[in-house]
Image (cartoon, grey):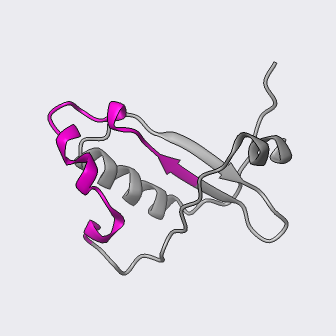
Amino acid sequence: MATPIRVRAIPVNILLKILTDLYERGVDFIDFEGEMDEAEDKLGVSFKREYMNPEFAETFDTFDETDLEDNEEPEIEVKKLTDEDLNQIL
């Protein structure tokens, strides 16, 4: 049985904006990554070219956060978690 991970207090409006933006750019699947610490829980999303609609996969290499439409949202830190990081969370 897998150990559950709980990431708390993720702002829904920011999460929805990110997911909507990814979907509109052709991303059909994502991976969730989480980090918990005493000060703040964090949730991140990532995807691969294989997760994209084939019609949009050609834009994968030009996909970056500077293309986001609304720059008024807070900057979101992207950190790739290793298996060791996840094991420490559990």
Quadrant in the rendering for residue 53: top left
Q: Residue at x 14, y 34 (%)?
A: 55
Q: Residue at x 78, y 44 (%)?
A: 84
Of all residues shown, which one is farthest toward the top? Answer: 1
**Is 46 in the magenta?**
yes
Q: Judge left or right: residue 86 versus residue 50.
A: right
x and y percentages locating residue 5 in the rendered image:
75, 41
Q: In this rendering, is residue 83 above or below 81?
A: above
Q: Position of residue 50 (x, y in %)?
A: 34, 30
Along the line of sight, which residue is nearer the eye, 38 or 61? 61
Q: Tell me what residue is drawn at x 46 percent, y 63 percent.
A: 14
Q: Give the vertical position of 62 relative to 3 (above or below).
A: below
Q: Quadrant of the N terminus?
A: top right
- View extreme (left): residue: 55
- How many badges with numbers are in the image? 0
In the displayed orientation, state which residue is furthest to the bottom. 72
Q: Residue at x 20, y 48 (%)?
A: 59
Report which quarter residue 83 is drawn in: top right
Residues in magenta, as a range: 44-69
In the image: residue 72, left or right of residue 88: left
- Confirm whether the magenta stretch covers residue 63: yes
Left or right of 48 in this view: 9:
right
Viewport quadrant of the C terminus: top right
| Residue 4 located left or right of residue 51 | right
Image coords of residue 88 (percent x, y)? 85, 47
